[in-house]
Image: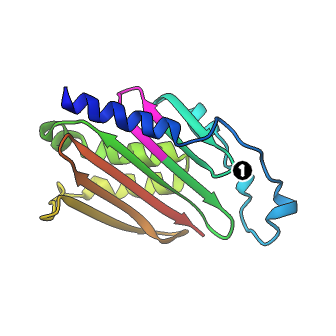
Amino acid sequence: MKKILHINLLVLMLLFSCKGRTQDKQTFNDNYEDCVYDPNSITESLLRDNSLIYSYLWNDKEKKGSAILKNGFVLKINKWACTHYGASVEMLTDISFEEFNKNWRHYILILFKISGDVTPYNAVDEYLKEAKNPMFTENGTFSINITSDGLYPMINVELTETEDGYLFYGTYYKN
């Protein structure tokens, strides 16, 4: 019961963290003249069109969203574009230790699938094919850094063991 209450409170906080589904868009030419990448190319479609997502909120001005996945996990995503193009994704799960040991690679790949970018997803997928089971540090974390062509400085994945499951975090920058 306590576990469900924690997850429900987290879901409510995430869902109310965005002010609305979409905000006013700025035009690339008017406000981002020095940018290499067009920030307006990042839209709610990355959440709306994703088959893993049950419900979501998107703030177009900040390029941030939160979602509940069909499996009940809670997700936060932040994307950016200007000089670099990238994303950070957090996913809170309530999986058991046994489920984690069996499918941790799958859950890491979900982070990068939801980001909507093929390059980091493929780099992580390739890396995880050879990866050993994670060894957590004393503070309950595990970190992977992956370098890949076209990505700077690297792809970063962190896993944190929580009282009720695991927090998966992934980020990348694209030059």
| Residue 73 in view here | no
Reply yes or no: does residue 171 show up in magenta. no
Residue at figure coordinates x 41%, y 26% from the top left: 70
Q: Secondary structure at mark 1?
A: helix
Looking at numbered disc 1 in the image, what kind of residue is underneath it? Answer: Ser
Q: Which residues are magenta?
A: 67-76
Q: Residue at x 81, y 58 (%)?
A: 28
* Residue 115: % across, % down: 52, 47
Specify whether 45 is left or right of 160: right
Kindly identify the residue that appears in the image at 30 percent across and 64 percent down. Answer: 144
Q: As displayed, is residue 95 above or below residue 157?
A: above
The residue depicted at 72 percent of the width and 42 percent of the height is 23
Tell me the quarter of the picture where residue 146 sits.
bottom left
Image quarter where the N terminus lies is top left
Q: Residue furthest right?
A: 30
> Residue 119 versus residue 37: which sits nearer the camera?
37
Drawn side of residue 172 relative to residue 167, left or right: right
Query: Looking at the image, how many numbered discs can be counted on the residues?
Result: 1
Residue 170 location (% of width, % of height): 40, 56
For mark 1, what is the residue? 41
Query: In this view of the protein, which residue sits in the foreground, 98 or 61?
Result: 61
Colour treatment of the image: rainbow
